Image (cartoon, rainbow, N blue to C red):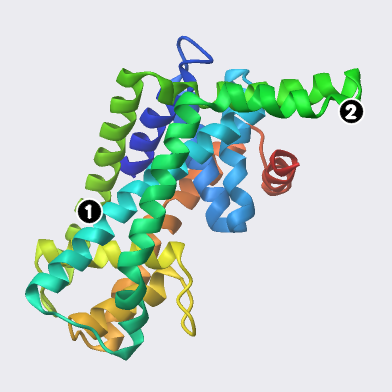
Amino acid sequence: MATYYGRALRWVVFLKPLKANPSLAKVLTATVIGFAAVTLFGRPGELVRPYLIALKEGVPVASQISAWVLERIFDLLMALLVFGFALSYLAATGLHGGSRLAWVFATGGRSIGVCAVAILVSLAFLRHVAEGFERFVLARLGFLGDSRLRALSGFTGALVRGVESVRSDAALVSILLYSILEWALIAACYWCLVQSFSGVFRITFVEVLVLMGFVSFGTVVQIPGIGGGMQVVTVLVLSELFHIRLELAASFAMFVWIMTFVVVVPVGLVLALKQGLDWRSLRRMGREAAT
């Protein structure tokens, strides 16, 4: 549950260029409700959180969509670092999985390199040339007419303001530190869960990080013939790399899913109902934010 507080702290940094004193309590409430929506509705629920934060803080929705993109960029960066550590550890120890993980080993290093370059290019673009690119696009779309151009200018301006935080060195350092805190909490969660299974299997803390790295990679990249679900990748890594019995690996994977996704649903629903939101309104928010 503490990870949601960490995410809210990081999002407050995204908000500060738009609002001098954003409310941490409001952002935290929207974060919990948003993640409950993701669990209930799948990926379409992702946009409930930025939509709610925009409403609560009185800022443009487009700016919070930009903040959501920034959050995804930094989470992907941390996931790549953990997965890179996992591959390095396996290479150093000579530990290899079965054929069902061969694709991950074959493409993992190349994927890390490509994604890392893409992240650095994205951050450099957002930090230095976003406004210039906005002016370039608007200048080329002058044929749309004044009314449409003003509407488009307002939208693109909100998008650019949403990424203002990465232009400040202090804010960028804060975002990185909060991202490290977030993933340290996730690692602690995995480690505590492993301890609860200590009577039936044991893996070290370093091996827990290896498991985290593969799970984070597997949830981003669809593995051919297998899929990309968190539970599937967890079962594969535990059974193929650490030779844990399939039924124990499946049980552990189910607990990981419950702890990382399902546990927030009751709290999110209570907070949503307290604010007058129901199932239909949450789904409507996701659709409105998407359009």
Specify whether residue 223 is in view.
yes
Write the residue at 9% across / 71% down: 92
Residue occupied by mark 1: 187
Q: Position of residue 62 (x, y in %)?
A: 65, 30
Q: Position of residue 268 (x, y in %)?
A: 51, 44
Write the residue at 14% across / 80% down: 95
**Nearer the N terminus, badge 2 or badge 1?**
2
Instruction: From the viewer's side, name the closer residue of 120 and 155.
Output: 120
Instruction: From the viewer's side, name the closer residue of 249 and 163.
Output: 163
Hey, what amino acid is under mark 2?
Leu
Secondary structure category for the residue under label 1: helix
Vertical position of residue 36 compared to residue 218: above or below: above
Instruction: From the viewer's side, name the closer residue of 199 and 68.
Output: 68
Residue occupied by mark 2: 144
Whether residue 174 sits left or right of residue 23 in the image: it is left
| Other residues around mark 1 within 10 Å, as few (<14) / some (14–19) / many (≥20) | some
Classify residue 278 by image quadrant: top right
Q: Position of residue 80 (x, y in %)?
A: 32, 55
Classify residue 208 by image quadrant: bottom left
Question: Which quadrant, please, contains the C terminus?
Answer: top right
Hey, what amino acid is under mark 1?
Ala
Q: Position of residue 140 (x, y in %)?
A: 78, 28
Distance between the Cα atoms at labels 2 and 1? Answer: 50 Å
Vertical position of residue 68 compared to residue 228: above or below: above
Write the residue at 28% across / 80% down: 249
Secondary structure category for the residue under label 2: helix
